[in-house]
Amino acid sequence: MKHEDVQEYYGKVLQGSDDLQTNACCTPDDVPEYLRKVLAKIHPEVSEKYYGCGLVAPSVLEGMDILDLGSGSGRDVYALAGLVGANGSVTGIDMTDEQLAVARRHVDFHAEAFDFDVPNTTFHKGYIERLGELGLADASFDIIVSNCVINLSPDKPAVLAEAFRLLKPGGELYFSDVYADRRVPEELLQDPVLYGECLSGALYWNDFENLAKAAGFADPRLVEDRVLTIENPEIEIKLNGIGFHSATYRLFKLELEPACEDFGQSVIYQGNEPNDPAQFVLDKGHVFKTGQEMPVCGNTFIMLRDSRFAPYFEFNGDFSQHRGIFAGSGDGFPFETMSEPVKSCC
């Protein structure tokens, strides 16, 4: 599919979330209270034209400079703007005029809603595969987010490469998207509805992880995921048994090893992050309870020590003694499975 096909679908075919034909572009309702308060301040027109599939608001955002790839109507940009505060900034990139018009209409509204003297948001028209055309400097963002958009790109390796270029050392690409449990047949890529609904452009999850590593993001970390049930019989027939998951990954721009190696290290979460006093969630396999020492592999140690998370942890150990592969690490299908389908959250 071409950029023009996606622009047509999101600019003219879809007029609101009720026009979606599947539950792929649908965010779960279990939103943390601090984020719920921020979302309550978002302008209704912005929320009505939101088509995300996850929550792209990681911990520790105060003062961060964030880039949103495929920002659409601006819902995530404005939510993040409230979380980074007046000393942070959020830049949105989108290629669809209709979506950008909605986002830009409400810049001043949200600055006032968050009690900022001046807006901390900026929107640019552009393609997420060609961010160099926008003059964005290397290593200029702390965090890059994206919400159910990378699957729509015809050149996903370029998106990942551009994200790596734009991140500061220790920064991360934190994004939600749709993934398939196998490679989607080429002929389905030409179906405008399947593509526009974020299905036929979805990467096979293992292909994605290999692309991420090739772009420089060693050791991709799955944060959360859920089964997509589609709930459209006509579309399910076309898909012929392909399974889909909505998943959130975080990819760090750090010097990491290809595998999780054991150096006898451990960390203790100190509970001093205001929005997460009881526990800190790094990824699906690493939930740190406050005050409890937890053994970690070398990569996890680096992710916490050499990122914005360092002030919130106590670090024990070094890299002087290698003990082999970290117990419990391994490869395989990463997502949840279920015996009974869940209802759509749309």
Image (cartoon, rainbow, N blue to C red):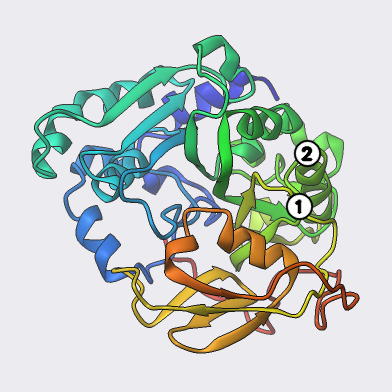
Report x, y in % for residue 100. Answer: 35, 23
Proximity of marks 1 and 2: CB atoms separated by less than 8 Å: yes
Amino acid type, residue under disc 2 in the picture: Leu
As displayed, is residue 126 above or below residue 270?
above
Q: Is residue 68 left or right of residue 45?
A: right
Q: Which corner quadrant of the image does residue 51 belong to?
A: top left
Mark before the other along the chain sequence, 1 or 2: 2
- Quarter of the image with the N terminus in it: top right
Residue drawn at (64%, 50%) of the image: 251
Res. 230 in view: no
Query: Which residue is at a point 82% across and 46% down the rendered structure image?
Result: 184
- Label 2 element class: helix
Q: Residue at the spot x=51%, y=89% of the render?
A: 292
State which quadrant residue 149 falls in.
Answer: top right
205 or 259: nearer the viewer:
259
Q: Position of residue 289 (x, y in %)?
A: 48, 85
**Picture disc at residue 188:** 2
Image position, residue 275 (x, y; %): 31, 69
Residue found at x 20% / y 61%: 37
Secondary structure of the residue carrying tag 1 is: helix
Q: Looking at the image, can residue 233 be seen?
A: yes
In the displayed structure image, the side of residue 94 where residue 151 appears, left or right: right
The quarter of the picture where the C terminus appears is bottom left
Q: Quadrant of residue 342?
A: bottom right
- Is 217 placed above or below 39 here? above
| Residue under numbered circle 1 | 239
Whole-percent x, y for residue 10 in the image? 47, 30
